[in-house]
Amino acid sequence: MSTLPRKEEEVDGVEKAVKTLEDTKAGIQGLVDAGIDKLPPFFFVSPEVIHDHPTMTDLHLHTDFQFPIIDLKDILDPAEHKGIVEKIRSASEEWGFFQVTNHGIPEQVLKEALDGVKRFNEQPREAKMTYYARGNGAVRYYTNYLLQKKGVGWRDTLACVMAPNPAPEKYPSVCRDIFMEYSKHVRKLGEVILGLLSEALGLDPDHLKDIGCSEGYAFHCQYYPACPEPDRTLGLMRHRDPDFFTVLLQNQIEGLQVLHRGYWVDVPPMEGALTINIGDLLQLVSNDKFKSADHRVLAKNVGPRMSLACLFTTDLQPSEKVYGPVEQLLSPDNPALYKGTTIPNYLKTYVTKPGNGLSVLKL
Ligand SMILES: O=C(O)CCC(=O)C(=O)O
Ligand SMILES: [Fe+2]
């Protein structure tokens, strides 16, 4: 049995992995296609990182750990609306994560959106490599964010900026039409969710929309092939999302976990449901009332696991507009916990201080 790498070897390993993967531009699926049956050591993640918190397994024994599922069916019924807002408030405060059902996006569209992610990843290397890039751009295909130099996650990512300026001619043709279609639906749902989040903070329903929290959004499509040694790596390292909120579509293979009360808790895949999670920027403007929760994805020996995360944020153009705690939420008893920031500045610290983009703004 090979020994696990020490910390500095991990960093070396990351660089080696990046070089190999960038040389081939075939992603992790490319390694799988080449027939590897062992995990290359540069994917090893140390056990201290994998087991940084215990996993909560006996969920049904603990009512505190019942993952929030919120039915949006009666949202327009004045008698039910308040109760739904209250559930969203509680889930956003306690978990920073919840699932929604009866959200209005047809199941067929959800299925086809994931089929699009699959088609992109499962086409020959030559078709994918033209999209291989880091940094900014309307479309990027890459093997890792590498935000955290703690090993390379077992996944490939396709990121497409969808709003406010869609660029259909740049999206891969195998998923272009369904991405445009899903985009229409998810924009509508995003605005509904943002209205509910606004109300849940005690603000006017349009407040968060009016300050630009859903103006721009990007799709982050994650593709996690079956992993030959899933216990030695992660699909996606622990992180918080650098946006206001995320609408996440996942397929039926589990792996996503959220950190709740010191435990990793599974976010169960649920046919037809979508997962909503609060990002750092909503934690910032809500002055810590809502929580941007750490989450991660385990590697699995089955696959592919797939997800399509829609990250809602400002218009994605570098802007001088400053975001800080919303004034209406502040009082002598609830003073501002953060100073304001421009989004580009926040993103700079998010990248250099992973998982910690907000800490430098603390007052
Ligand atoms: O794959 C998933 O379920 C989670 C993806 C995620 O957390 C992200 O893209 O930020
Ligand atoms: Fe995430």
Image (spheres, rainbow, N blue to C red):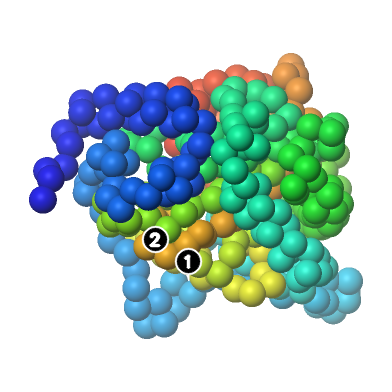
The answer, for residue 334, to whether it is visible in the render is no
Q: At x 49% / y 39%, what residue is drawn?
A: 27
Residue type for callout 1:
Glu
Rendered residue at 85%/53% (across/down): 181
Foreground residue, 225 or 148?
225
Report helix, strand or loop for mark 2: loop
Of residues 51 and 64, the one nearer the viewer is 51
Quarter of the image where one finds residue 241: top right
Q: What element does badge 1 sit on?
A: loop
Instruction: Look at 28% across and 30% down and name the residue there.
Output: 13
Q: In which quarter of the image is residue 69?
A: bottom right
Three-letter amino acid code of the residue under disc 2? Lys
* Whether label 1 touches label 2, CB < 8 Å: yes
- Name the residue carrying label 1: 254
Q: Residues within 10 Å of mark 1 (few under 14, many from 20)?
A: many
- Disc 2 C-beta below 8 A from ligand 1: no
Q: Is residue 49 left or right of residue 72?
A: left
Q: In this figure, what is the number of numbered marks?
A: 2
Q: Can residue 124 be seen in this view?
A: yes
Closest to the observer: 148 or 76? 148
Residue 16 drawn at (x, y percent): 32, 26
Query: Mark 2 = which residue?
Result: 300
